[in-house]
Each structure stands twice: as C-alpha cells, then as structure tokens.
Amino acid sequence: MAAPVATPARSTGARRRPGDTAFSGAAAGSAVLILVVLAGVALFLLVQAFPAITADPADLPGGEGLAVYVVPLLFGTILASLVALVVATPFAVGIALFTSHYAPRRLSQALGYVVDLLAAVPSIVYGLWGVFVLAPTLQPAYAWLAENVGWVPFFAGPASATGRTILTASLVLAVMILPIITALSREVFLQTPRLHEEAALALGATRWEMIRYAVIPYGRSGIISASMLGLGRALGETMAVALVLSGSAVGITFNLISSGNPTTIAANIALQFPEATGLGVNTLIATGLVLFVVTFAVNFAARAVVNRRKDFSGAAG
C-alpha cells in the first residue's frame, strides 16, 4: 500500500499586491478625511457661536436671548420640512413602484431619467417658480380654505393675497426632495428577490398583493432611509425658501396660508447675513449650529433604523 504523499502547507495569508495596499490606504484615508472635515465644521460652529451663547440677552437681535431668537426659526424649519415630507413621500413611493413594477421598460427608463433630472435643477430656479407660478396659482385655493375650512388651525387665515406662504414653500421643498426619495426607493424595490415575487404570484396573489406583501415590506427600511435623506435636504434648503418667504417672518404659528409665516434657519441666515455685523454674525452662526445638530440627529436616526433592519428578509415578514 503506497504511503500518502505529503502536500506542502499552504500559506494562511494571501500576499497583498501593491495596488490592494494603495487602494485600502486611500479608502481608509477618505473615511478619516470625512470625519476630520465633519469635526472641523462642528468646531468652527462652536467657536463662532460661543460669543452669542455667552452674551447678554439684551445684546442679541431681538433683545430677548438666543433661545427666544432660535426657537421660532427652528419651528419654521421643522414645520416646512415635515409638510414637504408628508406631501412628497407618497408620490415618490408611488412613482418608484410604477417605474419598477408597472411601467413598460422604455417608459420606466424615460420616466426615471426625467425624475433624476429634477434633482439637477438649481434651487434658485425652484424658488423663482414658487414665487411667480406656484404662489399665484395657489392663492385662490388658500382663500377658499380660509373661508370654508378656517376652523382648522392650519387654514385659519386670513389668506395671503400673494400666495407666498409657508405652505407654498413646503410644496416647493416637496418637489425638490421628490427625486431623491423616488430614486432611492426605486433602487430598493428593484432589489427585492425575484423568488419572493414569483412565490407570491404563484400562490394566487394579484400584482398589488405581491407588492404589498413582498416588495414593500422588503423595502421598508430603504423607504425610511430615503425619506430621512429627503428630510435632511429639506431642512437645509436655503434659496428657494428665502425667495418664497422673504419679508414675511413672524413667530410660532401653525397657520399655513396667511401672509405672516415662520421662516427657516437657513433662509434667515441667507437673508440676514449680508447686513449682520459683530454679535449678529455670531448669532446667525449659532442658529447654523442648531441646524447642524438637527440635521445630524435626523441622519443618525435614519442610520439607526436601517441598521436595525439590515438583516431583514422579505420571506421572514
């Protein structure tokens, strides 16, 4: 009986090529650079906002303190962004489902290109469209809402004579974040395992039932992540909101159709910064720090939701 032939021991570690080492180093350096830039921005905001944080309230714009100055701006920012998100998300998910599971291939590609092109339109163009087209078009609807649905706090009126309201600004923001949510949701829906879809159809489900029980549950975390990215874009939008709401800033109000509207942090900075000096500049930067924290918290929450469901399987429900 022949003795077994000894085989040479294989190396446990593969030899790294110079290209692999360079690519790994570049990737790690990019990740570190992002953290450094983020930390640098946060440090700059903290240093520049510190004089406003520690200043006497009477020396700040409004003369009532930093919190009284920031809270109405933060309220307007969150209100406009949430209204935009509520309006845009159903349309975005519907468009994504249509292009991924209903439309013919050519129509789906053409519609996808059109939606993606919306993201390339400059925000100043959206702002001009909101001022000269959308606002005058919506003004009669605002008057009707104030007259017939005025018992609802959102439509208490009196209606704006120009249509340049926080609701108009929110609808402009909804159009701006629509391509972001649509594109990401579409890609998530296309990642649904084909076997899950075919299994649902084989069990007698209609196309809508297949989407309801296989596609949407599989892409739920992706929809949430896309919505939060859209919300982050809406929170930081500047010029479009500044054009629509310029000269109409008031305090905290839930009235969406009146001429007096809460403005946003980003729009207020854009409008006030050219004329600000001294402590006024520090105050505006302090509001920017608040916006930075809010945006970071929104993106952190979105990441937490995605990570919690990263092992989700459509078959597992």
Image: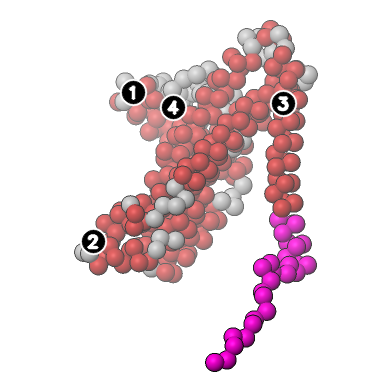
Q: Which of marks 4 and 3 is nearer the N terminus?
A: 3
Disc assigned to residue 152: 1
Q: Distance between the residues labelled 1 and 2?
A: 41 Å
Q: Give the range drawn in magenta.
A: 1-27
Q: How far apart are marks 1 and 3 (CA)?
A: 41 Å
Residue 236, how many percent across, how many down?
59, 36
Q: How far apart are marks 1 and 4 (CA)?
A: 10 Å
**Residue 11 in magenta?**
yes
Q: Earlier in the sequence, mark 2 or mark 4?
A: 2
Q: Name the residue under label 2.
A: 205
Q: Which of 106 and 34 lies nearest the eye of the viewer? A: 34
**As drawn, is 58 to the left or to the right of 100?**
right
Q: Earlier in the sequence, mark 1 or mark 2?
A: 1
Disc assigned to residue 256: 4
Give the crowd class for mark 3: few <14, some 14-19, many >=20 residues within 10 Å.
Answer: some
Residue at 77% over, 20% down: 277
